[in-house]
Image (spheres, helix red, strand yellow):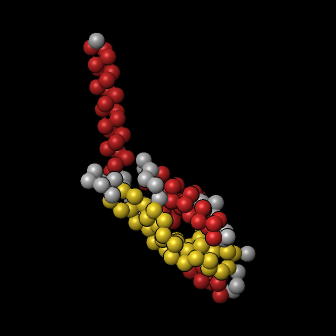
Amino acid sequence: MQNITTKFLKLNVVIMTLALLTSCATSMTPMQVNNTLPTLTKSKFISQAQAEEAVKSNGCKYLVKGRNYTAPIGLTTKDDLRNGAKGIDEWVKLDGGNAYVLNNYKWVTVDHNGSTQLHIEFDTMLCE
């Protein structure tokens, strides 16, 4: 009986430690987002400066500006970003495009436990 109790206590410690570690990281730095998001999307990531140049040279055109997407909450910030990337890809496809420009993002606290949810603002584009 004591062996079962010890295992139960150890399991609880592990679970609580994991919960604490995942709840501490509630956002990413801009550099982390800009380095990670393009690896998670199928659509082409274009910086704001690149987008303006591409439009001027007729290489791209904006399809929808200022699209907002609230990603489903993940267990980690990378999961949040992965969920956001999926939403971006779906909107780009629905808009008939193949690229996007990230305009803004933020993690918003959604409950009294400190859980956060990723909100993304982006433009969809069609590029050659």
Q: Is residue 53 above or below residue 38?
A: below
Q: Of residues 9 and 35, which is closer to you in this image?
A: 9
Q: Residue at x 65, y 65 (%)?
A: 93
Q: Of residues 70 and 116, which is closer to you in this image?
A: 70
Q: Residue furthest front?
A: 94
Q: For residue 109, what is the image quadrant? A: bottom left
Q: Residue at x 29, y 20 (%)?
A: 6
Q: Residue 83 at x, y = what percent?
A: 51, 55
Q: Residue 19 at x, y = what percent?
A: 34, 42
Q: Is residue 82 above or below residue 17?
A: below
Q: Is residue 17 above or below residue 112?
A: above
Q: Residue 13 at x, y = what percent?
A: 30, 32
Residue 3 in view here: yes
Q: Is residue 107 left or right of residue 40?
A: left
Count of numbered circles in the view: 0
Q: Residue furthest bottom?
A: 56
Q: Residue 3 at x, y = what percent?
A: 31, 14
Q: Is residue 97 above or below residue 24?
A: below
Q: For residue 14, what is the image quadrant? A: top left
Q: Of residues 74 and 16, which is closer to you in this image?
A: 74
Q: Residue at x 59, y 73 (%)?
A: 124
Q: Residue at x 32, y 16 (%)?
A: 4
Q: Quadrant of the C terminus?
A: bottom right
Q: Quadrant of the N terminus?
A: top left
Q: Residue furthest right?
A: 128
Residue 31 in view here: no
